[in-house]
Image (cartoon, coloured by chain):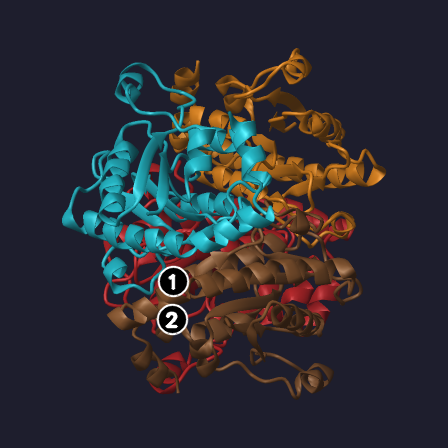
Chain colours: A brown, B red, C orange, D cyan
Amino acid sequence: MARILLVYSSLFGANAQLAALAEAALGAAGADVRVRRVREVALTGEEQAAAEGAQIATGADLTWAEGFVFCSPSHTGLLSASMKAFIDQHHDSAAAGAHLNKTFTAMATSGYAHAGQERVVDELNAVGAAWGCVIVAPGTADEGLNVHNGNPYGLSFVLEHGRLPGSAETTGVLRRHLHRLVAVTDALAPLRAADARTGTRTVPTIAGALT
Amino acid sequence: MARILLVYSSLFGANAQLAALAEAALGAAGADVRVRRVREVALTGEEQAAAEGAQIATGADLTWAEGFVFCSPSHTGLLSASMKAFIDQHHDSAAAGAHLNKTFTAMATSGYAHAGQERVVDELNAVGAAWGCVIVAPGTADEGLNVHNGNPYGLSFVLEHGRLPGSAETTGVLRRHLHRLVAVTDALAPLRAADARTGTRTVPTIAGALT
Amino acid sequence: MARILLVYSSLFGANAQLAALAEAALGAAGADVRVRRVREVALTGEEQAAAEGAQIATGADLTWAEGFVFCSPSHTGLLSASMKAFIDQHHDSAAAGAHLNKTFTAMATSGYAHAGQERVVDELNAVGAAWGCVIVAPGTADEGLNVHNGNPYGLSFVLEHGRLPGSAETTGVLRRHLHRLVAVTDALAPLRAADARTGTRTVPTIAGALT
Amino acid sequence: MARILLVYSSLFGANAQLAALAEAALGAAGADVRVRRVREVALTGEEQAAAEGAQIATGADLTWAEGFVFCSPSHTGLLSASMKAFIDQHHDSAAAGAHLNKTFTAMATSGYAHAGQERVVDELNAVGAAWGCVIVAPGTADEGLNVHNGNPYGLSFVLEHGRLPGSAETTGVLRRHLHRLVAVTDALAPLRAADARTGTRTVPTIAGALT
């Protein structure tokens, strides 16, 4: 039962909506899921209130997970500053090998069709690669995903009035892609166990550093 | 006399050192220069003290400038969270056309040779492009720059023990590339003036919004 | 009167259609235009026939131009092999400085919304940057372009049944963006002239090498 | 015993040298290896002679493989035209799902330190992602790889006088990274078998189409 951590950044709520839909899809795929929000670098008033109650991602969550789903809006074509701050904060444990052979997939949202949707998932994938994760991208090889908009590098969604289209298509592509993520995560479990035994992945040290 | 704003992010001081060298090179090229630091999202103790005294970049600085030099360290292969926070904060004025036909060039530093040096300047250039700036990259077409390490998309520097190599080569490539930036910025002045007259670039509104 | 070279790659005709629309827009902006096709690496039967009559881009065309528009379809998310072959073939003159301070803009087409539209223009822009060109991207700062799909790095078009939507919107964004390209190209003319005088740009040698 | 296909493009021989070193490393990791060269789009005289005898990659090789290593020189900062022609030629089978849940890793060489080494492996990884492969990048999480130059997205090598440094370090990083590739490929074997049973991966049709 793969342990999947979904980390999202959300200024106006669309990624919180995406996180909830993805959580359901991961659960349906048999994963043990944690959904966590990054601490937003800049929130004011109404947005701050909306963020209340969300659980904030910690180093312990990263350590716990065997696979990652990272979701960010596109701000000026790049991932959000808040998501980047979370990544920077946990650089040391990642560089020490805490996430080797875990899985990683990226998602993005934007208001315009091309305002960085490819670029944001590409940036997030680069982080997953740097961490030593195995990258599971949707690709264009799966008919069930190709009904969607065709971003091969990560699922991405064009917002309508600031919200995800809550359609059956959105639910369908999330289910299909995240089912594959869970399957790859499960398949790599023996490899992660072997890493732990041989010390390639120095879990105890890292876990300690993150507390 | 081109007005050039250099904005940098610096956690451990290397980009502050780079900013100082670039300031001298821009001055030598005849530019009117402002060097400003972004507010670091996360600084502690010693680093905080080192940042004291640096002037923090504001929206008024962005409005003032006719050309930009953005310098960021590579953190997990991407631009720093602090630089991204600055960019996000000033998205609205940029999207409203405040920087159309200004010039833009990017610089990066990292501890390892390939740990994101191409990617960080590429991200920064994407921001410049989104803002409507004209991108001036070093390229590989200038012999005086090719003596350096050959990053065509932005000047990048591999640190030695956390510091820039303070060599004649570093000074030389900065002088050569930034001289070109200033020349392009000057050449585009009539275009920016025409934009202002025809209202393509709605300076007054923007300037007001930024105060 | 800026001399603009449009180079395109077209397997099934959509980019030939784009080239024709862009040629009209460049003409309307007052440019002296050449439209040239790259030699397709792999064409068969019907496609070969369609390509008959198109003028093939040469090194002399590159030398002649003061600004470039490069148009490629997205094949497996990257620029076409034929476009890349053309770029590789003319590497030496570019690396010798033949195109310093010329202008460059990129366009892409694809059948799906996100199948590499950002990535293809990003690749083409990287070539322009390597050549020492100044990159003129549409950005998100121009209201007249933002009615379109919002790709900040280059104009990109989602095909309908293998053809460009031949709408007023397509014509409008081409006119608006290419008008700006021509204006920037004209504004940089004195700089290119100065480069030629000081030998930064060694035109005669390059022109000779290309014949 | 994972079946790994190494596909390389080589104009002046460095990637042929890299392919030979990687073949040895893959063999040491227990893989069943095929090393194949793409048909070079443009070779003349001496280079043509050097390429004689190399086996040319075919669609049958792609079908056979369970994991891929793609090696390209950086030409003008992008993958070689020849490598791209090979990718374009085999688009249809890949898009039909022939390579779902196979593994993919990228390598690059260039004469300068930053002349596209990050970008070339990033492009190749994008192809792997589009094909539905799982991307195995070196990352920065493995001490044995961090002694090298630190490109997290794919192994990359700066040439010395047109040749790979044939050092113990080069051999070491190849062994370490490719051992991991083989391990991930083996771990995903049950998943590929399940895909084949459920028809997600329509192998027979594809294999037929490629002959």
Disc 1 packing (10 Å; few <14; some 14–19; many ≥20): many
Q: Using the image as rendered, state which of residue C189 and residue C147 is in the foreground.
A: C147
Q: Are marks 2 and 1 in contact (CB under 8 Å)?
A: yes
Work out which residue is located at the far right of the displayed protein and give it: C168
| Mark 1: amino acid | Gly
In which chain is the residue bearing label 2? A
Relative to B136, residue D147 above or below: below
Query: Tag on residue A132?
Result: 1
Is disc 2 in the same subunit as disc 1? yes
Q: How many marks?
A: 2
Res. A38 mark = none
Q: Earlier in the sequence, mark 2 or mark 1?
A: 2
Q: Residue at x 64, y 50 (%)?
A: C152
Residue displayed at 46% across by 48% down = D102
User: Looking at numbered disc 2 in the image, what kind of residue is underneath it?
Assistant: Ala
Q: Where does residue C149 sit, x and y in percent of width and height?
A: 73, 49
In front of the other: C121 or D145: D145
Q: Quadrant of the C terminus of chain A?
A: bottom left
Spatial separation of the CA atoms under disc 2 and disc 1: 8 Å
Q: Do we see residue B20 in this rendering?
A: no
Whether residue C168 appears in this view of the structure is yes
On residue A94, which mark appears?
2
Give the class, few, some or many, for how many residues have Cα within 10 Å of label 2's Cα (few <14, many ≥20): many
In terms of depth relative to the viewer, which is nearer, D94 or C106? Answer: D94
Q: Position of residue B183 (x, y in %)?
A: 49, 45
Residue visible at 35% across and 47% down in the picture: D2
Residue B70 on image: x %, y %: 48, 60
Residue positioned 25% across, 64% down in the render: D143
Secondary structure of residue under mark 1: loop
User: Element type at marker 2?
Assistant: helix
Q: Relative to A192, is D92 on the left or the right?
A: right
